[in-house]
């Protein structure tokens, strides 16, 4: 998929879910003390990496792929826990986080080779 399409879709999803959490789920997220924080973190990471994918469009294919997969896994597990999924979902979250970190390392490696 075109990286700008991926960036646009992830960005739109992040904004929609962020707004939904702030307005449509306010009462539900108040039930679990950590839920609002999880929701905000998931939205922040999803949006941040949508912007990053758009910023490097055409440069580092593997960074964009790692970020897209990592952001999806990271955010999805946090969103799920905020909505009441079992806490063991938190054991999956670092897989997404590791993918995000790997994407940044690949970007640095790619940029180093270009300079």
Image: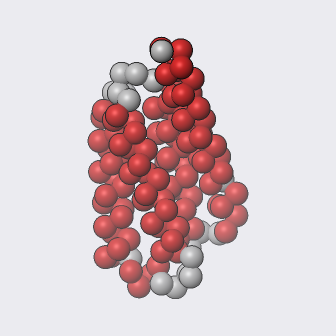
Residue 105 vs residue 39, the one in the foreground: 105
Locate residue 79, reporting x and y percent. 50, 63
Q: Is residue 52 left or right of residue 70?
A: left
79 above or below 46?
A: below
Residue 21 vs residue 100, the one in the foreground: 100
Q: Residue at x 54, y 28 (%)?
A: 108
71 above or below 75?
A: above
79 above or below 34?
A: above
Locate residue 43, reporting x and y percent. 42, 59
Residue 86 vs residue 32, the one in the foreground: 32
Q: Residue at x 65, y 61 (%)?
A: 89
Residue 91, image quadrant: bottom right
Q: Is residue 13 visible?
A: yes
Residue 12 vs residue 83, the one in the foreground: 12
Q: Is residue 99 left or right of residue 88?
A: left
Q: Residue at x 54, y 62 (%)?
A: 78
- Figure disc tally: 0
Residue 3, image quadrant: top left
Locate residue 37, reporting x and y percent. 51, 71
Q: Is residue 80 visible?
A: no
Q: Residue at x 41, y 85 (%)?
A: 27
Quarter occupied by the N terminus: top left
Q: Residue furthest top?
A: 114
């Amino acid at each position: 998929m075109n990286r700008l399409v991926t960036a646009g879709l992830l960005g739109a999803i992040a904004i929609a879910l962020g707004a939904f959490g702030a307005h449509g789920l306010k009462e539900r997220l108040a039930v679990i003390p950590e839920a609002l924080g999880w929701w905000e973190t998931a939205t922040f990471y999803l949006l941040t990496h949508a912007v990053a994918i758009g910023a490097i469009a055409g440069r580092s294919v593997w960074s964009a792929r790692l970020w897209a997969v990592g952001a999806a896994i990271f955010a999805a597990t946090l969103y799920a826990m905020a909505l009441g999924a079992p806490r063991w979902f938190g054991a999956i979250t670092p897989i997404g986080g590791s993918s995000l970190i790997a994407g940044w390392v690949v970007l640095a490696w790619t940029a180093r080779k270009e300079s």
